Amino acid sequence: MPNKKLNAKLLWMQFEDVLAPRLGLTVKERAVYSYLLRHSLVVGKVRVQFAVISLARTLGVGVGAARHAVRRLDELGALRVLKRSHKTGHLVEMRQPERIRALRRYYASQAVAEPPASTLETTDFWKTWALRRAIHDRERGACFYCLRRTAANMRCLDHVVPRVRFGRNSYRNLVSCCLECNTRKGDRAARDFLRTLYRLGRLTAAELDGRLRALKELAAGKLRPSL
């Protein structure tokens, strides 16, 4: 793709009105994407190189949160990580909204029917906006971890078994949670994180027991989303 300067106004409108809401980006993911967009497509470049530490410092977020945001944007197809290096940092290729597969198929995804039980177990619930929304709807607006009611634009999906530990995009491993819990949990085990919330007074003893039971039910496939 040539280094052709795009219509920055149109690009930004697509980001705010289409890409961010339909991919369900968190506040920090929006900040990271807009920063990378500003230093790539907006100025006519397809690729941008950066150090995660510098990115985090510029945006005023934690290094772990910045790294997680880049990884999730890559998983969503909003960008493609071409190279990671301790010396030179990340090299990523930015994608225009219309080139992101999940957005091209957005309207068609609204008609997605619930997969039969035989295929439900193999369905990638991160693949489309409709499938991700089904996970959010299953929790009925509450954070799976702290049980706090969460506004739609402040919810995100979390892997109970982290991706770095080969956690899948299965409905058994994805939960809807608030941005704070998503950031605090990071790559920790869900059970350990729930106990941390209890020690911090965010969960009562009864709520902790309920959340631990919910984890078992989730792993057993008893908490199925409705599509």
Image: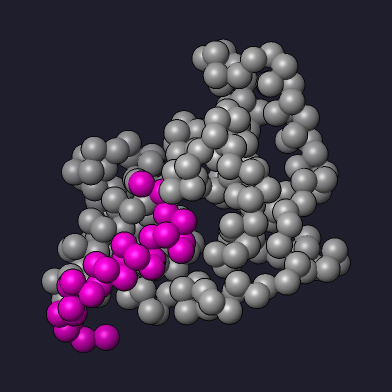
Q: In terms of image quadrants, where is residue 170?
A: bottom right
Residue at 60% in and 19% down: 203
Residue at 23% in and 75% down: 10
In the image, 95 versus 156, the foreground residue is 156
Is 161 situated above or below 95?
above
Q: Position of residue 178 (x, y in %)?
A: 50, 38
Q: Is residue 202 left or right of residue 210?
A: left
Q: Position of residue 11 (x, y in %)?
A: 25, 72
Q: Position of residue 218 (x, y in %)?
A: 75, 42
Say whether residue 15 is visible.
yes
Q: Position of residue 35 (x, y in %)?
A: 23, 56
Q: Is residue 172 left or right of residue 150?
A: right
In the image, 142 versus 166, the foreground residue is 142
Residue 16 located within the stretch drawn in magenta: yes
Is 41 situated above or below 163?
below
The main secondary structure of the magenta stretch is: helix
Say whether residue 174 is visible.
no
The structure's colour scheme is: one colour
Residues rendered magenta in the picture: 1-27
